[in-house]
Amino acid sequence: EPEVTQTPSHQVTQMGQEVILRCVPISNHLYFYWYRQILGQKVEFLVSFYNNEISEKSEIFDDQFSVERPDGSNFTLKIRSTKLEDSAMYFCASSEHQFSNQPQHFGDGTRLSIL
Amino acid sequence: DAKTTQPPSMDCAEGRAANLPCNHSTISGNEYVYWYRQIHSQGPQYIIHGLKNNETNEMASLIITEDRKSSTLILPHATLRDTAVYYCIVPGNAGGTSYGKLTFGQGTILTVHP
């Protein structure tokens, strides 16, 4: 069964450094998402992306964050200058069509640890 | 997004059916009910979704009341591996201001015991 894959599974970065989290969505999916989950807290929506544009973003997704689909298969989340509070699990998801009757499928996440 | 209410925790014996309730009294006529689960910080796993009719797949069944204000996820023969946090979510209606973000609540912690 097709699945969303994320790399790396664990990323350790010094505060202030840039980090790029990578995702390969399911191949025929057109909508892409990033979520994050701080340890012990809820899963939170960050951003949705379609047709090479951000469709929606949350308040968390400030100017430090950016997303890109650099080629036909990858979808990336960049954090420009990491802060301690960026430590979290980051989940990528994709869906075939606009959401209302199409489920999002999630990857197993990247654990980002900021030192 | 329509607000959902779920019990914080439930227990189930292995091999028995697990019935997880969810209230979504503010759901609008064309909003779907989705169920996901999360096993120990893995990515949320899609289980099932429905609009009006009851739905069944290889993982679970979804029973939606006629007024659509509540639903029940049924795991017919729970196993220890079904221990997880289960989320009932009613996303915003695509085509409005929401492009389909999922809003996760606290969910129900289901513990399946031997």
Image: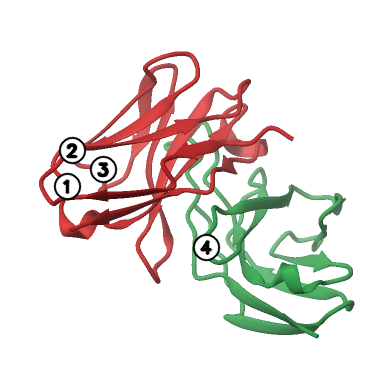
Chain colours: A red, B green
Give the percent coordinates (x, y) of residue A94: 54, 34
Give the percent coordinates (x, y) of residue B92: 52, 45
Q: How far apart are marks 3 and 2 (CA)?
A: 15 Å
Q: How far apart are marks 2 and 1 (CA)?
A: 6 Å
Q: Do the residues labelled 2 and 1 touch (CB within 8 Å)?
A: yes
Residue at 21% in and 59% down: A85
Q: Of the residues shown, which amino acid type is indicated by label 4? A: Lys
From the image, tell me which residue sits under label 3: A61
First reached walking from the N terminus: tag 1 or tag 3: 3
The answer for which chain carries disc 3 is: A
Q: Distance between the residues labelled 2 and 4?
A: 36 Å
Numbered label attached to residue A48:
none
Numbered label attached to residue B3:
4
Q: Can residue A111 be seen in this view?
A: yes
The answer for which chain carries disc 2 is: A
Q: Of the residues shown, which amino acid type is indicated by label 1? A: Thr
